[in-house]
Image: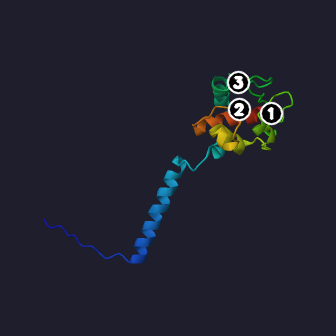
Amino acid sequence: MTINLSFRAIAPERCLGLALAVFVLGITALLPYSSAVSAVGQAGNGDPKRGQELFQRRCTSCHNLDTEKEGPRLRGVFGRKSGSIASFNYSEALKTANKTWDADSLDKWLTDTDKFIPDNDMNLSLRKADERADIIAYLKQLSNQ
């Protein structure tokens, strides 16, 4: 029994092409798991039904949809300027923030309220991007946007 182990030299330009192909394939395969992909991209894919359940569990101790509680009412929040409901007593930070609530701003807000608008009165953050995306999808659906 003979084993033929003959190797041919591979041209350097071919090695570079192969390495580049492996790199691109690796990036493509791993990108969906990267923290660089924010929930904003997922907000369009958020599940409003799951968002409603999460909203009821995580948000209703301070927020209602149609009346003020410890936090402002949230129906119609999409497209609304921060600190703009006259009947709610916002922090100075929110009154002067001049943000418009959309998928991007809500994602940043729910990720880290103090980082997005320092010195506000809300003390909650949602670490899981999919939960933020679901709640954002639910609030967007309620705002008919």
Cα gap from disc 2 to disc 3, whole angstroms: 12 Å
Identified by mark 3, the residue type is Cys
Kindly identify which numbered label has been placed on residue 53: none
Cα gap from disc 1 to disc 3, whole angstroms: 17 Å
Of residue 57 and residue 142, the one placed in the foreground of this image is 57
Kind of element beneath mark 1:
loop
Location of the C terminus (image quadrant): top right
Identified by mark 2, the residue type is Asp
Q: Residue furthest left?
A: 1
The quarter of the displayed image where residue 117 is located: top right
Kindly identify which numbered label has been placed on residue 62: 3
Residue under pointer 1: 76
What crowding class fits label 1: few (fewer than 14 Cα within 10 Å), some (14-19), or many (20 or more)?
Answer: some
The quarter of the displayed image where residue 2 is located: bottom left
Location of the N terminus (image quadrant): bottom left
Q: Residue at x 76, y 41 (%)?
A: 101
Query: Mark 3 and mark 2 in contact (Cβ < 8 Å)?
Result: no
What crowding class fits label 2: few (fewer than 14 Cα within 10 Å), some (14-19), or many (20 or more)?
Answer: some
- Counting residues from the N terminus, which is met first, the one under dot 2 or under dot 3? 3
